[in-house]
Image (cartoon, rainbow, N blue to C red):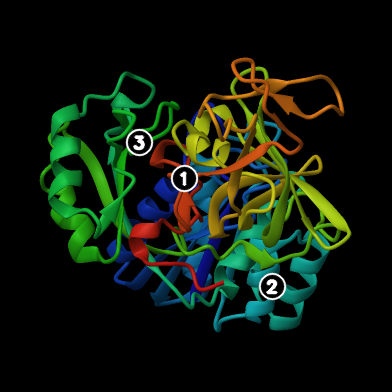
């Protein structure tokens, strides 16, 4: 059977992955076999998400009715029902559901009614609490078909330590990154000297290591020194796969969906209040604004070097009329030209303007010229893909260390 769970956490505590890890251990104690633990990230732009919009799925061999009871009891024991946005859902099915529902949930929006219709048609066991929104993620989890996968080991705290300051040795995190990158990523942000894998919210997670395989995330995990952990779980996941991105065109983008959009820069980048950088690009007659917000740090330096005429491909979420950049491909660069007064052919001195529409004149010898000098400047920017730093990367965004995007 496949067991899906979603929406049990809140900003104040709990974590759906922790509940899933605890459930796996309770099922094993009941002599059931847990074949796979899967962490499924869904549309990152859902406005009612509590944190990272993750659902979990367990592939289990055992009694479905007993498993469903254990899962529901655990949700009532651990879920944070005090939060308005916490609306859990539990689903148990004997076969994988139509993956089209998962694909819609990761790239678009699904409704509770759509989820219930699919569950009823499949004869699923399911239960939703409060407004039952968690049934969407739980259904998507048991419908998930992952064409590309990564791994994450999540190390959880002992329950008595929940809500207290975490104790994780900072240097050991940087050492683990240095020893295992590019097979693991986003443990730390070396360019900005920031720890990424240790959360700051009062949930059960102590730290998490993302990587290409269980072997690599475990190799990094074993190098990390910390407070005594509670339980640990390696998850198969769609993180770092760009599963949320759709092919899009300027002028035909929907709010809160994520796209890959080609275009030509039409307005030079501007730095706004707060350090946010924006530029405009077009694809024919339609244009769209692209944003590199302050948290993207050094990525903004790449964006600031763009010039009108540069051909780019922008990848990111479309919100409030802008593409919020997660990565950008520079396909080709226009010539950078500087217009200056010409040099005097006699004196080799720079001429000065003789007035609007009157050309240029040499102050030394009086020689004249009609046209300015157009000089080409060298550009340090080179074509290729650029990405936001780890401290600003979304769960689903594929890091360039995993390979060059093929869209």
Disc with the residue nearer the chain's start (1 vs 2):
2
Indicate left or right for 283 with 76 as reference.
right
Q: Which residue is disc 1 drawn over? A: 378
Q: Is residue 21 above or below residue 280?
A: below
Q: Which residue is disc 2 drawn over? A: 101
- Say whether marks 1 and 2 touch (CB < 8 Å): no
Give the Cα separation between the discs numbered 1 and 2: 50 Å
Give the Cα separation between the discs numbered 3 and 1: 36 Å
Q: Which mark is residue 196?
A: 3
Disc with the residue nearer the chain's start (3 vs 2):
2
Label 2 crowding class (10 Å Cα cut-off): few <14, some 14-19, many 20+?
many
Nearer mark to the viewer, of 1 and 2:
1
Secondary element at tag 2: helix
Q: Quadrant of the C terminus?
A: bottom right
Residue at x-position 62% and y-position 27%: 276
Residue at x-position 46% and y-position 51%: 386
The number of discs equals 3
Secondary element at tag 3: loop
Disc with the residue nearer the chain's start (3 vs 1):
3
Label 1 crowding class (10 Å Cα cut-off): few <14, some 14-19, many 20+?
few
Across and down, in percent, residue 302 comes to: 49, 41
Indicate left or right for 47 with 401 as reference.
right
Secondary element at tag 1: loop
Label 3 crowding class (10 Å Cα cut-off): few <14, some 14-19, many 20+?
many
Q: Is residue 60 above or below residue 87?
A: below
Across and down, in percent, residue 266 comes to: 75, 47
């Amino acid at each position: 059977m496949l067991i899906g769970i979603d929406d049990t956490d809140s900003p104040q505590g709990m974590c759906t992955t922790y509940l899933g890890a605890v459930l796996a251990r309770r099922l094993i104690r009941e002599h059931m076999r847990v074949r796979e633990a899967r962490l499924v990230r869904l549309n990152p732009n859902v406005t009612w998400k509590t944190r990272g919009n993750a659902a979990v799925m367990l592939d289990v061999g055992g009694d479905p009715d007993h498993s469903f009871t254990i899962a529901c009891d655990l949700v009532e024991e651990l879920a944070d029902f005090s939060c308005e946005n916490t609306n859990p859902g539990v689903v148990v099915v004997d076969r994988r559901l139509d993956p089209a529902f998962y694909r819609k949930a990761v790239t678009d929006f699904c409704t509770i009614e759509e989820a219930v219709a699919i569950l009823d048609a499949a004869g699923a066991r399911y239960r939703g609490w409060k407004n039952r929104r968690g049934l969407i993620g739980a259904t998507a989890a048991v419908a998930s078909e992952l064409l590309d996968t990564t791994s994450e080991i999540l190390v959880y705290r002992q329950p008595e330590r929940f809500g207290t300051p975490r104790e994780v040795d900072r240097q050991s995190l940087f050492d683990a990154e240095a020893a295992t990158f590019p097979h693991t990523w986003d443990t730390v942000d070396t360019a900005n000297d920031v720890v990424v894998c240790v959360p700051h919210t009062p949930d059960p997670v102590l730290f998490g290591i993302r990587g290409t395989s269980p072997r690599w995330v475990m190799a990094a995990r074993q190098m990390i020194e910390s407070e005594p952990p509670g339980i640990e779980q390696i998850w198969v996941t769609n993180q770092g796969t760009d599963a949320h991105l759709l092919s899009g065109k300027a002028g035909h983008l929907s709010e809160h969906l994520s796209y890959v959009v080609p275009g030509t820069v039409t307005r030079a980048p501007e730095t706004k209040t707060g350090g946010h950088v924006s530029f405009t690009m077009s694809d024919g007659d339609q244009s769209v604004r692209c944003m590199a917000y302050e948290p993207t740090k050094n990525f903004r330096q790449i964006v600031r070097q763009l010039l009108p005429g540069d051909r780019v491909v922008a990848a990111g979420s479309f919100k409030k009329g802008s593409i919020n950049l997660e990565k950008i491909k520079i396909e080709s660069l226009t010539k950078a030209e500087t217009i200056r007064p010409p040099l005097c052919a006699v004196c080799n001195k720079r001429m000065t303007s003789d007035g609007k529409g009157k050309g240029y004149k040499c102050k030394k010898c009086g020689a004249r010229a009609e046209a300015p000098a157009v000089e080409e400047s060298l550009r340090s920017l080179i074509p290729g893909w650029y990405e936001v730093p780890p401290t600003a990367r979304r769960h689903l965004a594929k890091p360039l260390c995993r390979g060059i995007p093929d869209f």
